[in-house]
């Protein structure tokens, strides 16, 4: 049985849960509250010395960290990884971009505004600019395309939907992005998720 250590408030953790569920992989979910320092305990650091959730422990005791690495491991050989070489490379392109250009702005604003109660005036304004640029980039890619990489739902869609669907909690208005909003609906339907915000 797989064990996933994750926080139900974290998009990085939820996308791992969604992939496991989508693929019918049995797992134990260990709720791990990052805001309470539960990723900094000696027991957790023995699993992931970086002190970050999510963390996956395999049946044989081996541990794996970093959300997108976990996604790739879980989805190996499944329909969530495109068979076409170019579509697969596009999926990787989006996965790398998500962690570098999307998550550091959108997820940070969600965490600080929605969960930590930081005032808008106390946030770095560059986070809003970067997040809006990320949303605009996705809107452009989804104009005329149902999915980000190839002709079907892939890990790229799941990874990017995790925080995008909750972007309004970070103060982002999704109204200017109709293709993006339609895509969020498709991903939520494909994964059986309730509509976010």
Image (cartoon, rainbow, N blue to C red):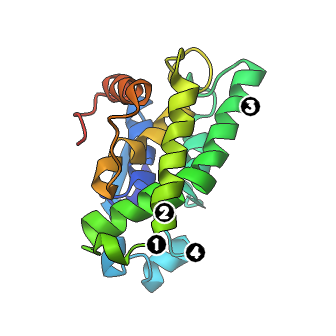
Q: Nearer the viewer, residue 8 or 179?
A: 179
Residue 41, position as x, y percentages in the image: 42, 83
Q: Quadrant of residue 112?
A: bottom left
User: Which structural element holds mark 1?
Assistant: loop
User: Which structural element holds mark 3?
Assistant: helix
Q: Is residue 132 above or below residue 20?
A: below
Residue at coordinates 48% horizontally, 52% vertically from top-left? 131
Ranked by sequence position, the earlier of labels 1 and 4 is 4
Q: Is residue 155 above or below residue 28?
A: above
- Asked whether disc 2 touches disc 1, contact meaning CB atoms under 8 Å apart, the reply is yes
- Asked whether disc 3 touches disc 1, contact meaning CB atoms under 8 Å apart, the reply is no
Ranked by sequence position, the earlier of labels 3 and 1 is 3
Q: Nearer the viewer, mark 1 or mark 4?
A: 1
Around disc 4, counting alpha carbons within 10 Å, would you say few (fewer than 14), some (14 to 19), or many (20 or more)?
Answer: few
Residue on which disc 4 sits: 50
Ranked by sequence position, the earlier of labels 4 and 2 is 4
Around disc 2, counting alpha carbons within 10 Å, would you say few (fewer than 14), some (14 to 19), or many (20 or more)?
Answer: some
Q: In the drawing, what numbered circle is on residue 124? A: 1
Q: Nearer the viewer, mark 4 or mark 2?
A: 2
């Amino acid at each position: 049985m797989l064990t996933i250590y994750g926080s139900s408030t974290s998009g990085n953790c939820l996308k791992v849960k969604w992939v496991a569920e989508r693929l019918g992989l049995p797992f134990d979910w260990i709720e791990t509250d990052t805001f309470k320092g539960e990723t900094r305990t000696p027991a957790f650091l023995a699993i992931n010395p970086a002190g970050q959730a999510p963390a996956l422990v395999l049946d044989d005791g081996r541990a794996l960290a970093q959300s997108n690495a976990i996604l790739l491991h879980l989805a190996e050989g499944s329909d969530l990884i495109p068979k076409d070489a170019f579509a697969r490379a596009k999926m990787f392109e989006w996965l790398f971009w998500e962690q570098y250009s999307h998550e550091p702005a959108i997820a940070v604003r969600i965490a600080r505004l929605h969960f930590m109660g930081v005032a808008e005036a106390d946030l770095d304004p560059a986070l809003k600019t970067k997040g809006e640029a990320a949303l605009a980039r996705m809107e452009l890619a989804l104009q005329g395309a149902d999915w980000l990489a190839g002709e079907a739902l892939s890990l790229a869609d799941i990874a990017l939907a995790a925080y995008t669907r909750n972007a309004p909690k970070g103060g982002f208005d999704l109204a200017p992005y109709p293709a993006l909003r339609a895509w969020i609906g498709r991903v939520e339907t494909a994964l059986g998720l309730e509509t976010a915000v």
